[in-house]
Image (spheres, rainbow, N blue to C red):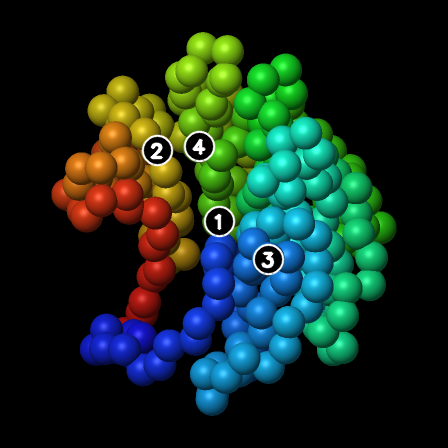
Amino acid sequence: LDVKTAKKLAQVDISNCRYLTFYKNKAYVTAYEGFVAVVDTATYKLDAKITVGREPEEMAVVGDRLYVANSGGYTSSNYERTLSVVDLATSKEIKRIDVAINLHRVKADQYGDLYVTSRGNYGDVKSNLYVIDTKTEAVKRKFDIEASNFAIDKDFAYIISTAWSNATMSNVISYSKINVKDETIIPGGFISDGTDKEIVMPYGIAVDPISSEVYITDAKDYVTPGTLYSIDKNGKKKFSVSTGDIPAHLVFYTK
């Protein structure tokens, strides 16, 4: 799409695609067939397919390497548990980092660390959040908090969790905040005025890079229109607005 007009420019067909990230003049798209598609952003053509693990999810770029979360989500008896490390100069997977089962989200902070979520097995192994040091390419910290989605802005990570339990057949919802500089959990989360009680099913999250306001999407029951909430720096609701069904992703555009 043209960001100014919202008109379609081209279409690239990638089966069962999941997440998208960019590096230089390339777009990288994970596909559940077990690869990352490389798309030229000038020609909109598929340049290459990089083989990674089973059912890859989110990605993040640090330096000249792409880190890909492998989930193995289609095989609950044998989940994947690694991050694929891709050399962006050669578009080849060069190694894998063992983390935890059923990986999902991956985001980089400004200090060269990766924050990675594991969805667990929805039973005795709970969701969790891990920190990977990209200098050593090894796990350096496990937070022991459940995490479904999160956004990092400057020194803070804002985390939402809708952890599903096969035992109770229900979601346990929570909100957390982490200082990524010293890797500490900040007590009380990031919503201070009770707005969290209004949100039925937190789904997407993003932070305005200029104002540091946190935006949370509420998917509600996944079949009716959702709601977008804006939370200010003091943790209070600034506004909410209705959206379409299952609001999930946000992009900020500066004119």
The kind of residue tagged 4 is Ile
Q: Is residue 8 above or below residue 123?
A: below
Mark identifier at residue 33: 3
Between marks 4 and 3 in the image, the one whose residue lies nearer the viewer = 3
Mark identifier at residue 160: 4
Query: Is any atom of residue 66 visible in this view?
Result: yes
> Are the residues tagged 2 and 1 within 8 Å (C-beta)?
no
Between marks 3 and 2 in the image, the one whose residue lies nearer the viewer = 3
- Report the Cα–Cα distance between label 4 and label 2: 7 Å
Local packing at callout 1 (Cα closer than 10 Å; few below 14, some 14-19, many 20+) is: some
Residue appearing at x 72%, y 74% in the figure: 91
The kind of residue tagged 3 is Glu
The quadrant in which the N terminus is found is bottom left
Residue beneath label 1, please?
153
> Are the residues tagged 4 and 2 within 8 Å (C-beta)?
yes
Local packing at callout 4 (Cα closer than 10 Å; few below 14, some 14-19, many 20+) is: many
Residue beneath label 2, please?
202
248 vs 96, left or right, is: left
Residue appearing at x 27%, y 78% in the figure: 8
The kind of residue tagged 2 is Pro
Most distant residue in the top direction: 168
The kind of residue tagged 1 is Asp
